[in-house]
Image: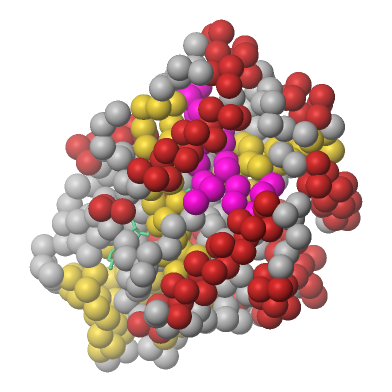
Amino acid sequence: MAGPRSLWLQEALRAEDGVESQELLEDTKADICIVGGGYTGLWAAIQAKSEDPGREVVVLEAATVGFGASGRNGGFLSSSLTHGLGNGLARFPDEMRTLEALAEKNYDGFREDLARLEIDCGFEETGHLGVALEPYELADLEEEAELMRRFGHEVEVLDEAAVRAEVDSPTYVGGLWARDGAAMVDPGRLAAGLADAALALGVHIYERSPATSLEARGAGVDVLTAAGKVSARRVLLATSAFPPLLRRLRHYLAPVYDYVLVTEPLSELQRRAIGWEHRQGLDDRSNQFHYYRLTPDDRILFGGYDAVYRFRGPVGARYDDHDPTFNRLSQHFGMAFPQLEGLRFSHRWGGAIDTCSRFSVFFGTAHDGRVAYAVGYTGLGVGATRFGARVALDLLDGRETEATRLEFVRRRPVPFPPEPLRSAVIQLTRNRLAAADRADGRRGVWLRALDRLGLGFDS
Ligand SMILES: Cc1cc2nc3c(=O)[nH]c(=O)nc-3n(C[C@H](O)[C@H](O)[C@H](O)COP(=O)(O)OP(=O)(O)OC[C@H]3O[C@@H](n4cnc5c(N)ncnc54)[C@H](O)[C@@H]3O)c2cc1C
């Protein structure tokens, strides 16, 4: 296997096919300058230009479009804006009905936008299958199904025989198939499609143009890069787990590395040996969970389990490789699908997740409202980024909406402690989550204390 490289980045986002391989080489002006060419930045560019074609919209991307999490993720599109109903209810119980209504609207809008903008990203409305690996997890399935039905979702609880009839792994003892609000996409084609749509609308995208700082000037803000600056009326920060241009954001974000393996395409025989006719996105229900899916060309993508936080949270290409995690994932894959023994992995990679303590996107403004940000999606941003972009734009325009009035939008997460305490707390929490998985899900004193404080660690 060659070096770490995202299948999606390789296939849809190769530099030579890059969208408009252009760097910022001189000073320019914009009504809105968006920093970050991932889903958040690209959706924001499309929305800003669609609602007011007269606006000059510039996107600055440090590497190439989709270089960050948007070109490396699993491609699980979930309607949830809150990292699941349970997490949302624990933190925003009074707003959950509204948040779910906004989530449904965002999900439907996502589907409509793909059609309107002619983005072909392998969108498959397969639903989502959560599988139980341990008998103690079965009781939770009924409870969760009940909760989801109360919020209008269509779900089905599967026993061992039924879940194995869907996907045949000897490790499964039951499952929960959420039939609505969940789809699969090809992440690279989504990023490339959004970039093409933005360009077609007249957005200027500058790649290989990292913004280095912000300077308030007159009624606007200058966004500086090594070769030139963008003098903008408004700035939208969409930089996810990367070092933020606003220092205060460091308190709220912990870049956590998540790793993925992808197999060679399955043969007809191998495909038959596992079933998976409905091609659902699948994850297991442990604290340390794996997620897996079929790619459009019938490979299996298998990721998750380890969520690696490093001291001070560095992000960069050297962290895309992590043999201990790849070895563990490969071993776990063998246990999940012993009938595929001998199937080789063709791709492996890692990517940084913008974890925050509430596990969902948060927002804010700076420089007297001239700068806004949407970050903190914590591993569930494929769908939520479209909503995040919308809200950040509304904050920039000073527009009050149903969303901007919510505590969900107005309240920031509880900050992580500074280093070295941060590393220690995260390691301890990871260790206790793993211990809970080994102890039939029982959460010890530490996790219960965090639960009471509304804090946590996830990916
Ligand atoms: C391995 C992995 C698997 C995942 N799986 C899923 C999944 O299956 N489903 C799901 O919903 N979510 C998943 N996620 C999360 C999801 O990918 C993200 O939430 C989403 O892509 C975030 O998009 P974004 O645009 O906010 O950030 P990013 O895609 O990270 O984009 C940020 C961009 O900003 C650029 N940038 C940073 N700093 C600067 C600067 N100073 N100047 C200019 N540009 C800058 C970066 O180069 C980058 O391109 C996963 C994430 C990872 C890493």
Q: Is residue 305 left or right of residue 321?
A: right
- Residue 303, image x and y in percent? 50, 41
Q: Is residue 434 left or right of residue 321?
A: right
Residue 227 appears in which quarter of the rendering? bottom left
**Which residue is drawn at the image coordinates 54% and 9% (left, top)?**
268
Locate the C terminus by quadrant: bottom right
**Which residue is drawn at the image coordinates 52% and 74% (left, top)?**
425
Ligand 1 shows up in the quarter that is bottom left
- State whether residue 318 is above or below residue 211: above
* Coloring applied to the structure: secondary structure
**Which residue is drawn at the image coordinates 38% and 64% (left, top)?**
310
- Residue 129, image x and y in percent? 70, 38
- State whether residue 389 is above or below residue 331: below
Q: Is residue 296 among the parts visible in the rendering?
A: no
Magenta stretch, residue numbers: 285-306
| The magenta stretch spans residue 301 | yes
- State whether residue 26 is above or below residue 301: below
Q: Is residue 23 left or right of residue 65?
A: left
Q: Is residue 347 among the parts visible in the rendering?
A: yes
Residue 240 appears in which quarter of the rendering? bottom left
- Residue 51, image x and y in percent? 48, 62
Say which of 281 and 3 sits in front: 3
Residue 292 appears in which quarter of the rendering? top right
**Which residue is drawn at the image coordinates 30% and 40% (left, top)?**
4
- Residue 323, image x and y in percent? 35, 43
Say which of 318 and 331 sits in front: 331
